[in-house]
Amino acid sequence: MAFGGHFFTDVAAAGLVNVSGDLAGRTAISIAWPSTRLSDARIDAALTRLGWPGYRLIQRWARARCGARSVGVNACASTLSAYSPAKFVGRQIQHGFS
């Protein structure tokens, strides 16, 4: 349009066709496949399953480091409580999963 190849109406019509096709496709997919409708609870459960093995590994590491058999028995409880699944996943995202 800027260099004289298309008129404004050509660009506007192409944009409307593109947007309407995209909306029609998204609507068809969400109606045809109900499993694509994700709730917050399902997403949270999936992220918890993803982060849980690493969380348990850190818990075992912290217990071995402190020598504790139970989380609430000694002063190491504060060390163990510093590692929650949400903090673990947050650190992994922050540091690029490395």
Image: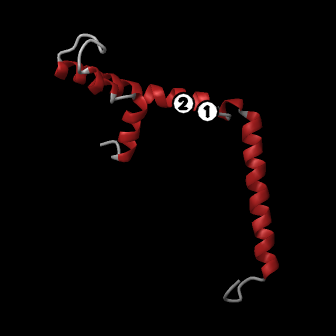
Residue occupied by mark 1:
40
Around disc 1, counting alpha carbons within 10 Å, would you say few (fewer than 14), some (14 to 19), or many (20 or more)?
Answer: few
Relative to 26, say whether 87 is above or below.
above
The residue that appears at 29% across and 25% down in the rendered structure is 78
Report how far apart the C-alphas of labels 1 and 2 lie in the structure. Answer: 6 Å
Q: In which quarter of the image is the N terminus?
A: bottom right
* The quarter of the displayed image where residue 73 is located: top left
* The quarter of the displayed image where residue 66 is located: top left
Residue 10 lies, in percent from the top left, at 79, 76
Q: Residue farthest to the front?
A: 75
Viewer-proximal residue among 67 and 38: 67
Q: Quadrant of the C terminus?
A: top left
Residue 86 lies, in percent from the top left, at 43, 33
The residue that appears at 73% across and 54% down in the rendered structure is 22
The residue that appears at 43% across and 29% down in the rendered structure is 50
Q: Is residue 2 left or right of residue 51?
A: right
Residue 26 badge: none
Secondary structure of the residue carrying numbered label 2: helix
Viewer-proximal residue among 96 and 87: 87
Residue 19 lies, in percent from the top left, at 75, 59
Relative to 96, say whether 69 is above or below.
above
